[in-house]
Structures are given as C-alpha cells and as structure tokens.
Image (cartoon, helix red, strand yellow):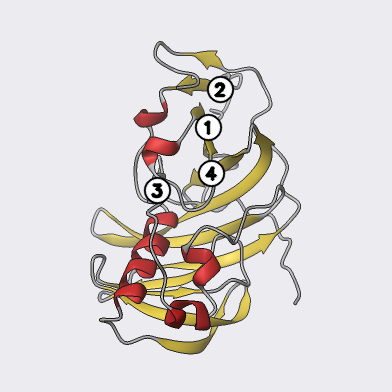
Amino acid sequence: MTVNKTRNIVRTPVLILICSLTLVIFSPTIIAAGIGSLCDGTEGLTTGQWASYSTDAGFMGMKTKVMGRYAIVATEDNHYWMEIESAMPVGDSGMIIKILIPGWPYTNETVKRSLMQMPRMEGMDAMPPIEMPPSSVQGENVSDPLQMACEEFEKGVVETSRESVTVEAGTFSATRIPVRQLGKDVWVSTDVPFGIVKMVDEDGYGVVLTAYGNDAVPAITEMPQVLPGSGEQ
C-alpha cells in the first residue's frame, strides 16, 4: 500500500474533540467484516501516525471547507499524546489541541491532560501553549462517528456493505455503515489511521480523508502555561 506522506494541515472546526470508549461485546459479524479491532480498541495507536481530513461546513449560508489533522506524537505512562490541528483553508497556521488519551476511541472523561496552542497572528510573537482542564475541550471529531458506526454495526439493524471507496488519499476497501444518530453514511477501514475514510450526510456535507502517514512529529514543544484546575487528574 502506498502511504501518502503529504503533510497538509488538516482541519476540522476549532476545538474538535471528544469521542466514546464504550466496551461492547462484538459479534462474529463485526469481526468478519474486518473492523472489529477498530471497534474494540485493539487496533492500537503508533507514534508518528497521522491522518488529514477535509470537512464540509456551512458559513454565512455558503458551503466551505475546513481542514483537520490528527497525529499521535508521543507516549507517556501508557497513554498517547494526540495533536489535532484545525484551521480554515487559508493562512499558514491554525489552532492546535494536544491531549493525552488512553487509546482510540476515547471519552472526554478519559482525557488525562489537555494543551492548546493558539494560531500565530501576523506581526506578533507566537503565544506559548496553555494547559487547560481536560474537560474544557469539547466538540466534534472523527472518533465520535467511528464509535457510533461500531454501535450501529453491532446492533445489526442497519444494512452495511463492503465497498471500494476512492478519496483524495487513495482507494480503500471499506465497510459502509449508515449511522442513524448522525444521519450520515460512514466508511471505515483498518487500512488507515483512526479508521475513518469518508462520511456523507443527506445534504451532501461530509468528511473525506485527504492524506495520511507515519512520520508525524510534535508541533507543541514548549512548556505550557498552566491554568487553575489543569494538569493530571
């Protein structure tokens, strides 16, 4: 498999986080479909893995693109440091959220630490990262749809199919799962980091994998300023 190592800053709306780590007993069906390891958390995370996504968003009545890049940049005490970069498709930098998580997917309650790096403003010095209470960072991310897709698949109440899906990052054999909670079809595959290849809703808005690789390095390296209530819980 050819790995796309183009390092686009991918983006999702600002403050993209929080997913679900729900323990489920998986049926032989879900395992046979090749996505069991994604759903039960045994697929694992590897330092350096990253994936970039293009997300459709509405802005002032118009459809635009926001980009998000997810990357595993380090490990600490059996947890993983994940950086999520988000920005509009203009400018040179975006916001970076860095969280210490136990695995993928995860819940807000399992986030051990949370840092934020604001975008650098033109003509101004870069601000140092800030450490915030883990519960303060919330929003939509690609882990939530993965968890919901796994739940729908396990219930066996939606019609799924194995399909060849072509996106900007390449062509993948993926399992399409209608996720009723979101009103979206989600395509998942163990061939890409974090599992999500594509999502599309009834109005044509969606999320598409644009690039991925295994050479991520930390973007936040400075010692953070600590806000009250931050740090290890």
Give the mark toward the camera: 1 or 3: 3
Residue occupying image coordinates x 39% and y 68%: 150
Quadrant of res 34 = bottom right
Which tag, 1 or 4, sits closer to the chain's start?
4
Q: Using the numbered discs, state the Cα–Cα distance from disc 3 to disc 4 in whole angstroms.
A: 10 Å
Q: Using the numbered discs, state the Cα–Cα distance from disc 4 to disc 2 in whole angstroms.
A: 14 Å
Contact (CB < 8 A) between labels 1 and 4?
Answer: no
The residue to which callout 2 is attached is: 129
Question: Of helix, strand and loop, which one carries label 2?
Answer: loop
Which tag, 1 or 3, sits closer to the chain's start?
3
The residue to which callout 1 is attached is: 119
Question: Where residue 110 sits in the image (x, y, percent)?
Answer: 43, 37
Q: Which mark is residue 231?
A: none
**Quadrant holding the C terminus:** top left
Amino acid on which the number 3 mark rests in the picture: Pro
Q: Which mark is residue 84?
A: 4
Which tag, 2 or 1, sits closer to the chain's start?
1
Give the mark toward the camera: 3 or 4: 4
**Quadrant holding the N terminus:** bottom right
Amino acid on which the number 4 mark rests in the picture: Ile
Residue occupying image coordinates x 60% and y 22%: 126
